[in-house]
């Protein structure tokens, strides 16, 4: 069995069966049933958010929250290219233009000191990414957004359970998107949610995820279908019961990696940010003038059945689907390019054994 970069957390089989049992009585499988309602309320209290709307996945949550703000077509959103395809695609699929801002050298989140130079009269929002669960400079971003009257939407797909100065990641900006994909710290198999400050968005989001249907005889929006089903919600209810334990186990794995790899010349390991309670979502390592390149390490691990991932390479502003388009140029974001060319995300999940971590580190250090 290969060691993959991640492995989904699952409850005991019996616990899940118990959770879905009543669905066989009700025959109510989707369309905001009892499990959906319960998960929504469980998450509201876990994330300490003002409002939450659940989705079939994180990507459509992000697409819908952008749509819900009703920005004029061709408006610009300042964002980071050092992320998963979803972030940039959510902007473009809404008919809006991403404007790429470079990232910080240390935590790979958006470089807030470079945002203001990118603001034009078309800018309507900032969409930063709490990449690897590292929290963006939320204070500086808020100050810029307030000054220029911009919305702030966080891609918090990696930040489930993370806190900054004791405040849940769900509370920064106007809205935050979380992904509950199988590969994330908390999963509902596939799933996602958006948390937000303005409670009036709730009606719009609920309509948008259900074909724009507002009532039996009223269709207010040209919406899609992005509802979370009852089986996914039940998985979430179970997984949420164990989230604390899962994060503690991840922490032990990360600490072991740090013991083995930090301080090695040419290897820059992930570092815990000041004032942040982490969820230990990822363990990215940057090989910078190390005796082997990132690609050599990647291949060597692969030969040993260890599948690390080049998260995030290539940058979204170099995707072939955007080739030749104005504003999509990796040279505009040199720090992001530098990191993307050297970063490797090592296997990390709650049940990864410390012996396997040793094996991975031995291969890297050999
Ligand atoms: C996983 C992920 C998404 C998309 O979430 P899905 O639930 O897979 O749709 C968006 N942004 C980032 C940074 C992600 O890692």
Image (cartoon, rainbow, N blue to C red):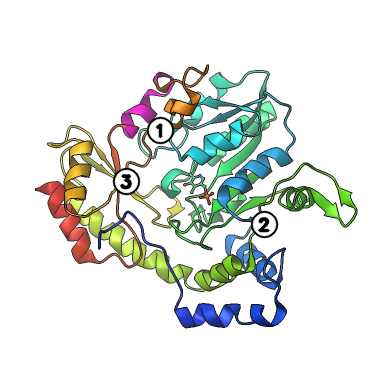
Look at the image and tell me in which quarter the N terminus lies: bottom left
| Image x and y of residue 122, in percent | 67, 21
Q: CA distance from mark 3 to mark 2?
A: 30 Å
Q: Is residue 216 left or right of residue 132?
A: right
Q: Is residue 311 left or right of residue 29?
A: left
Q: Is residue 203 left or right of residue 181?
A: right
Count of numbered marks:
3
Give residue 227's mark: 2
Which picture quadrant has residue 41? bottom right
Circle 1 crowding by C-alpha within 10 Å: few under 14, some 14–19, many from 20: some
Q: Nearer the viewer, residue 236 or 156?
A: 236
User: Is 110 contained in the magenta span?
Assistant: no
Query: Which span is picked out in magenta?
Result: 331-340
| Image x and y of residue 24, in percent | 65, 80
- Name of the residue lying farthest toward the right: 217
Sequence-wise, the earlier of marks 3 and 1 is 1
Give residue 309's mark: 3
Q: Is residue 173 visible?
A: no
Relative height, residue 357 to residue 312 (above, below): below
Give residue 104's mark: 1
Mark in the foreground, 3 or 1: 3
Q: Is residue 348 visible?
A: yes
| Image x and y of residue 127, in percent | 57, 36
Taking the spot 45% from the left edge, 52% from the top edge, the residue there is 276
Which picture quadrant has residue 330? top left
Q: CA distance from mark 1 to mark 2?
A: 36 Å
Q: Is residue 43 left or right of residue 71?
A: left
Sequence-wise, the earlier of marks 3 and 2 is 2
Mark in the foreground, 1 or 2: 2
């Amino acid at each position: 069995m290969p060691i993959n970069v991640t492995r989904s957390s699952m409850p005991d089989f019996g616990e899940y069966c118990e959770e879905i049992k009543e669905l066989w009585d009700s025959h109510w499988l989707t369309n905001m049933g009892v499990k959906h309602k319960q998960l929504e309320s469980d998450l509201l209290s876990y994330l300490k958010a003002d409002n939450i709307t659940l989705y079939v996945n994180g990507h459509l949550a992000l697409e819908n929250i952008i749509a819900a703000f009703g920005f004029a077509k061709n408006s610009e959103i300042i964002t980071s290219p050092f992320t998963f395809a979803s972030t940039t695609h959510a902007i473009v699929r809404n008919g809006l233009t991403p404007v790429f801002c470079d990232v910080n050298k240390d935590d790979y989140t958006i470089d807030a000191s470079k945002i203001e130079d990118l603001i034009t009269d078309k800018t309507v929002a900032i969409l930063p990414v709490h990449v690897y669960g590292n929290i963006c400079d939320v204070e500086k971003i808020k100050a810029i957004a307030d000054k220029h009257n911009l919305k702030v939407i966080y891609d918090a797909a990696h930040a489930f359970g993370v806190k900054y100065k004791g405040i849940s990641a769900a509370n920064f900006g106007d809205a935050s998107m979380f992904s509950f994909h199988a590969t994330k710290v908390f999963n509902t198999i596939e799933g996602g949610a958006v948390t937000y400050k303005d409670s009036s968005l709730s009606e719009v989001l609920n309509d948008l995820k259900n074909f724009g249907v507002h009532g039996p005889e009223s269709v207010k929006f040209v919406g899609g279908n992005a509802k979370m089903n009852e089986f996914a919600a039940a998985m979430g209810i179970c997984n949420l019961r164990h989230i604390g334990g899962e994060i503690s186990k991840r922490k032990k794995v990360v600490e072991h990696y740090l013991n083995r790899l930090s301080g090695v010349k040419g290897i820059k390991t992930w570092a815990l940010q000041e004032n942040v309670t982490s969820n230990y979502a990822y363990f990215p390592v940057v090989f910078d003038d190390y005796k082997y390149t990132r690609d050599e390490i990647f291949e060597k691990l692969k030969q040993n059945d260890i599948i690390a991932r080049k998260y995030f390479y290539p940058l979204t502003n170099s995707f072939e689907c955007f080739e030749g388009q104005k504003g999509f140029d990796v040279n505009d974001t040199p720090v992001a390019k530098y990191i993307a060319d050297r970063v490797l995300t090592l296997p990390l999940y709650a049940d990864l054994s410390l012996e396997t971590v040793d094996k991975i580190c031995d291969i890297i250090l050999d």
